[in-house]
């Protein structure tokens, strides 16, 4: 190299610190068309010298450290080089991150640039999917390493992991480890070409099959998941914990595509066990179902309540007729409670009491009434009493007939109720069950009206008895 060329290169290197625009690109061009570029700055850098886009052979390249932040910075590739037939110079990889100046000279032209050289990553490993089947990936300078040795050991010597042992990476530089049976911390070490890299990883056992119940004070929703993912077509069984308790939602179900099953609201507080089964696994949970706010239900028509109840249990396997019948019987607003009275008040609700107390009505003589206050079969008015006695007898016979008719009608009502319940229990079709439930509601309301009419007739009969009183010839309290 001529003295003149050396002087030019030295001047270019000294002036390079003032050239900031070219440092970001790693490419610099001289006024005469000479250019210098540096590629692969994070591996083994390559310097390329061109003039008018043509490779320049035998161009002089000078590399020096210009890191102002670290005066002790060094780079093994500093020095003077000469380009080959392709106009290139290969530089060694940096051992640590460093900034260098690269100057090229050809003839009377020069070009310079600054480049940040990064030390290569070297051998590295990474562990992904640690919550299921862990995957170990080994790379060298970001490239996958095949046939690297991988060793897995538990950090805690008292802990165990089925995946502990020696492995070798595949063509993708990976090793797949088995799922942990319980949470465990492991140490993973990779070795390749006398280099090694290690990492400590917490491997989590998967959640497995899980079941949860939400909205326990309303219409409960059962959700089944497997490793956090919704399970479709899982079997769900609902049973009451207390064998004497009842719950309309007890039975067999199958989850939908969202892994859920909707259950009907509890009619009374009850504890149930919910079991989910899927692919040989099963899991159970016990929950308390409570009765929610009934204000809204009380304001709804009875027919709408029946339809909503059927919709709630339509997914249950098996017949729903029995459950619908029980719901109608327990919730029909036409069913009067035992203590409810008839039109005349609570005392008129029992026909039997009316029959027994008819003799207590005003004007009816007590059983012991008669001559000398003695009890005998011939007590009552004398044989020559007023003919109105016959009318009284007729009234008594009519009243007795009315009581018999009432008893017959009550027996018929009981038979009809029993037939309705049996029909509802045998009904398995959802639409038929709904229609029959509504018919039952109408029929029971009709029967309630008939009972009210009968009670009113009994009350009028009682009033007639009171007006009859004793015969005209009967004496007053003082007698005649």
Image: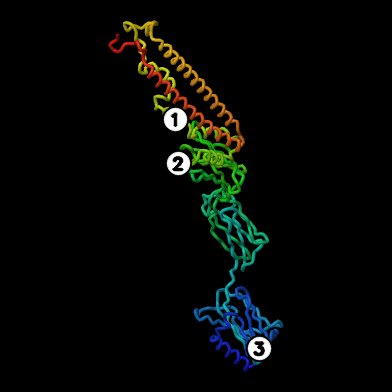
Q: How crowded is mark 1: few (under 14 residues within 10 Å), some or many (20 or more)?
A: few
Within-10-Å neighbours for mark 3: few <14, some 14–19, many 20+: some
Q: Pinpoint residue 176: horizontal percent, then vertical percent.
A: 62, 55
- Residue 290 visible in rendering: no
Give 381 or 119, whichever is nearer the viewer: 381
Q: Which of marks 1 and 2 is nearer the N terminus?
A: 2
Is any part of residue 91 visible from this angle? yes
From the image, tell me which residue sits under label 1: 337
Q: Outermost residue toward the right?
A: 85
As measured in the structure, the alpha-carbon distance from the residue carrying label 3 to the one carrying label 1 is: 108 Å
Mark 1 or mark 2, which is nearer to you? 1
Up the image or down, 227 lies above or below 443; here it is: below
Which quadrant of the rendered structure holds the N terminus? bottom right
C-alpha gap between disc 3 and disc 2: 90 Å
Closer to us: 248 or 447: 447
| Disc 3 to disc 1: CB gap under 8 Å | no
Could you say whether the residue bearing mark 2 is in a helix, strand or loop? loop
Please indicate whether residue 111 sits to the left or right of residue 348 in the image.
Answer: right
Residue at image mark 3: 33
All told, the count of numbered labels is 3
In the image, residue 186 lies at what x, y percent? 54, 55
Q: What element carries label 3?
A: loop
**Horizontally, is 198 left or right of 172 in the view?**
left
Q: Pointers 1 and 2 in contact (CB under 8 A)?
A: no
- Which residue lies at the image location 61% right of the left edge and 61% below the top edge? 137
Q: Which of marks 3 and 2 is nearer the N terminus?
A: 3
Q: Are circles 3 and 2 on residues that touch, CB within 8 Å?
A: no
Cα gap from disc 1 to disc 2, whole angstroms: 19 Å
Q: Name the residue under label 2.
A: 294
Q: Under tag 1, what secondary structure?
A: loop
The quarter holding residue 460 reads top left
């Amino acid at each position: 190299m001529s003295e003149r060329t050396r002087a030019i290169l030295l001047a270019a290197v000294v002036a390079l610190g003032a050239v900031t625009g070219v440092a970001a690109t790693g490419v610099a061009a001289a006024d005469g068309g000479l250019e210098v570029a540096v590629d692969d700055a994070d591996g083994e850098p390559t310097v390329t010298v061109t003039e008018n886009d043509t490779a320049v052979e035998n161009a002089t390249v000078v590399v020096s450290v210009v890191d102002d932040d670290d005066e002790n910075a060094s780079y093994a590739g500093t020095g003077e080089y000469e380009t080959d037939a392709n106009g290139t110079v290969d530089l060694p990889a940096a051992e640590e991150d460093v900034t260098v100046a690269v100057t090229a000279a050809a003839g009377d032209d020069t070009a310079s640039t600054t480049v940040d050289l990064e030390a290569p990553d070297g051998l590295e490993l990474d562990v992904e999917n640690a919550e299921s089947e862990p995957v170990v990936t080994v790379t060298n300078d970001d490239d996958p390493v095949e046939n690297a040795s991988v060793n897995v050991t538990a950090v805690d010597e008292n802990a165990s992991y089925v995946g502990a042992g020696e492995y070798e990476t595949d063509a993708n530089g990976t090793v797949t480890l088995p799922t942990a049976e319980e949470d465990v911390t492991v140490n993973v070490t990779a070795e390749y070409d006398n280099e090694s890299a290690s990492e400590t990883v917490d491997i989590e056992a998967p959640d497995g099959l899980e079941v949860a119940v939400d909205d326990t004070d309303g219409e409960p929703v059962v959700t089944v998941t497997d490793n956090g993912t919704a399970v479709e077509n899982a079997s769900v069984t609902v049973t009451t914990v207390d064998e004497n308790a009842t719950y309309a939602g007890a039975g067999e179900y199958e989850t939908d595509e969202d892994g859920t099953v909707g259950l009907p609201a509890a009619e009374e507080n009850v504890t149930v066990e919910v079991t989910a089964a899927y692919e040989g696994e099963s899991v159970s949970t016990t929950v308390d179902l409570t009765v929610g706010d009934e204000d809204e239900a009380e304001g709804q028509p009875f027919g709408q309540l029946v339809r909503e109840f059927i919709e709630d249990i339509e997914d249950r396997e098996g017949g729903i007729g029995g459950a619908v019948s029980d719901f109608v019987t327990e919730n029909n607003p036409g069913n009067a409670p035992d203590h409810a009275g008839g039109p005349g008040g609570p005392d008129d609700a029992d026909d039997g009491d009316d029959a027994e107390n008819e003799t207590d009505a005003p004007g009816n003589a007590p059983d012991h009434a008669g001559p000398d206050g003695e009890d005998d079969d011939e007590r009552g008015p004398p044989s020559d009493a007023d003919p109105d006695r016959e009318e009284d007898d007729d009234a008594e016979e009519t009243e007795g007939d009315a009581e018999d008719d009432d008893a017959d009608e009550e027996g018929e009502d009981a038979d009809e109720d029993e037939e309705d319940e049996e029909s509802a229990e045998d009904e398995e079709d959802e639409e038929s069950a709904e229609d029959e439930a509504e018919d039952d509601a109408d029929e029971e309301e009709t029967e309630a009206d008939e009972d009210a009419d009968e009670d009113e007739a009994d009350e009028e009969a009682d009033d007639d008895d009171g007006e009859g009183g004793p015969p005209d010839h009967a004496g007053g309290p003082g007698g005649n």
